[in-house]
Amino acid sequence: MLIPTGAIFVAMLLFAVFVFAIGQSPLDVFGLLYEGAFGSGFSWQNSLLSASPLILTGLAVAIPAQAGMVIIGGEGALALGALGAAVAGAALGGLPPLLAQFGILLAGALVGAFWIGLSGWLRNYRGVNETISSLLLSYIGIALLNFFVEGPLKDPASLNKPSTAPISAADMIGNLPGLEVHYGLVIGALCALFAWFILRFTTIGFALQTVGGNPRASQMAGLRVNRWVVGAAAAGGAAAGLAGAIEVAAVQGAANSSVVAGYGYAGILVAFIARQNPLAVIPVAILLGGINAAGGMLQRRLDMPDATVLVLQGIVFVVILTSDTLTGRFRARKQPEAALAASTTAAIATTITTDGGEQT
Amino acid sequence: MTGTTAAIGWWGVPLEILAGAIRVSTPFLLVSLGECITEKSGRINLGLEGVLIMGAMSGYGASLYTGSPWLGVVAAGIVGALFGLLHGVLCSLRRVNDIAIGISIMMLGTGLAFFLGKPLIQPQAPVLPAIPFGFWSSSPQIQSALQINPLFLAGVALAVALHFAFRHTRWGMQLRIVGDSEDAARALGYQVIPVRIRATMIGGFLAGTGGAFLSLYYPGSWNEGLSSGQGIIAVALVIFARWEPLRCLWASLLFGGAGALGPALQAMGITSGYYLLNAAPYVLTLGILIATCAPNRKISGAPGELSLVRQ
């Protein structure tokens, strides 16, 4: 806790220097940033709204990371998840709203799971590096979204911005009671909690981290490494696809190019700053969402360009990621997780296999 | 249709695509050669997108205030090299992840460029001249197609030079050894970290000049929508080229050609499939990876220390 807090402080200091250098008062800027991000109920709602997709795209990176993968293709899985959700929305139009909503979200998650699961599959069965393949698949996914939205699935009524046919208003995901924040935030937070619980308290999480720590030893101990890797990639993809589905069902109302807004890339940072911990993804996403939301305030009150928040985010992330180097320098070094997993792999994996959990 | 168009008829289409490919491919070429050098040293800089945009902005600004577009290119390169230095130094610290730092530098560069570039959107800076290789022809179409920017020629020359340098110079050997095996490099007495920092700086320099090409030649103005992801596409391109400078050249032309084909087809009234065409290079890259990879084997040609390919 000490290191990230210190890092944010250092980042703020650097940003203050930047603000001072361009002739604004750092104190005014910080005051407005706080006001715009977390200073009132209204700004909290804006921050939570921006945080909502980031929780899920953060999970898209953090879950596969448990199995030792670096997946950076969340943007494409999100795009295709949005497309899948829009198609499902059109197909499920007649159903009771709750059922239709469930179908829409499920469709998005499934499409996303397939897309990133493909990266995991390619890694296992063809030896293609998952970072590269997920990046390439991401571009392909975005291109597919654009193709379908401007081609076969284009709603003729959408003139200015080509979109798919809108899902019916009754099937839209509404806001939390009394708030301007849609249920997507709750869904995202529940997913993060669920992932954290599974990873922390079940043999599934244990097995996954064992596979991430030392695939060969896991194999020797009877874990089906391939399945775990593909499964973790698919679970991450499902999170990104779900983010896309929520963008469609709660914000845009249809799939269009607006869903490709960089949430996938921002999610990579969220996951790295949260140290791939699904629970920590939530506050990091809210912090990032808050900085995003405060941008408008700086623009309106101080006439600073909206890019100011990008500068701040860039500085914050560079400093926080750099502060990783300090981990473990202030206290007795913990054994690195990977090494720990490797050294105890045999014992753990044997336990799991004798439990019979892996034999099915 | 004018007389001259009729004179060369349908030949106008491939000519237009060729000219477009050269124009569109130049930033790809410069950024990918830079990324190739960085990756050869065993690091990946995903932040080149931000460096490219920063280069575009600072190059445009320098050209506006000094009146010389070439000084703009130099300024863009220097700014790019500074960002490369930042990436190189930070990633030399223990436990700092180069992929994550790259993405945060992409954000920082983009943010700074948009921020500092606000006053540059309106004024028109002097732009780079082109060499008229079509002087022999009376057809204005051929003349305009053969307007080639010196930066493209510099990129081609650099690709050839790097192809040679990686194999036959001390610098190239050192770079490859550092990128392939840290242990081997240390055993030979090379300083791994300085080599990597230099390689990342050169990569940043080239990405910066690639950005200057965008703002000072084609499309030739500064605005926030200037880059369409060339910096991050170049990363895929280097993989496609399997870390070979000459293949980077062909790959850039291919990616550029695919980018130029879309508008050319659109001009002919063929609009469907435009986006699929744009995705073709990625599908091709993935296809090549699937075909050449096998379980328990690295992508052929990949530097051994590259975090991207370490399993």
Image: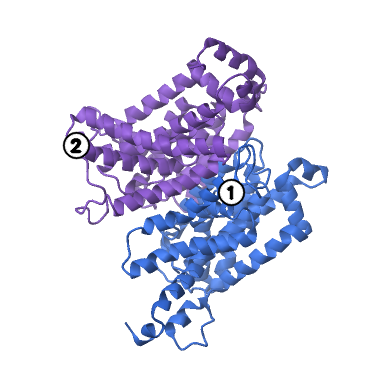
On what subunit does the disc labeled 2 rest?
A
Q: Colour of chain A?
A: purple
Q: Is residue A197 above or below residue B200?
A: above
For label 1, count other residues whose C-alpha is less than 10 Å away and answer few (under 14), some (14-19) or many (20+).
Answer: many
Q: Going by the image, does A254 lie left or right of A214?
A: left
**Residue A6 placement (x, y as % from top left):** 55, 32
The chain ID associated with circle 1 is B
Q: Residue at x 32, y 43 (%)?
A: A83
Mark 2: which amino acid?
Answer: Gly
**A69 left or right of A246 in image:** right
Residue B115 x, y percent position in the rendering: 44, 54
Q: Which chain appears blue?
A: B
- Dot in front, 2 or 1: 2
The percent position of residue A89, horizontal first and vertical second, equals 24, 38
For image coordinates 27% across by 41% down, the residue present is A87
Query: Image check: A297 left or right of B229?
Result: left
- Whether residue B61 is visible to the viewer of this picture, yes or no, is no
> Which residue matches tag 2?
A93
Residue type indicated by callout 1: Asn
Please indicate, yes or no, whether residue B161 appears anywhere in the rendered image. Answer: yes
- The quarter of the picture where residue A176 lies is top left
Of the 4 image quadrants, the one containing the C terminus of chain B is top right
Foreground residue among A65 and A9: A65
In terms of secondary structure, where does tag 1 sit?
loop
Residue shown at the point (22%, 56%) measured from the top left: A159
Q: Which residue is mark 1?
A: B45
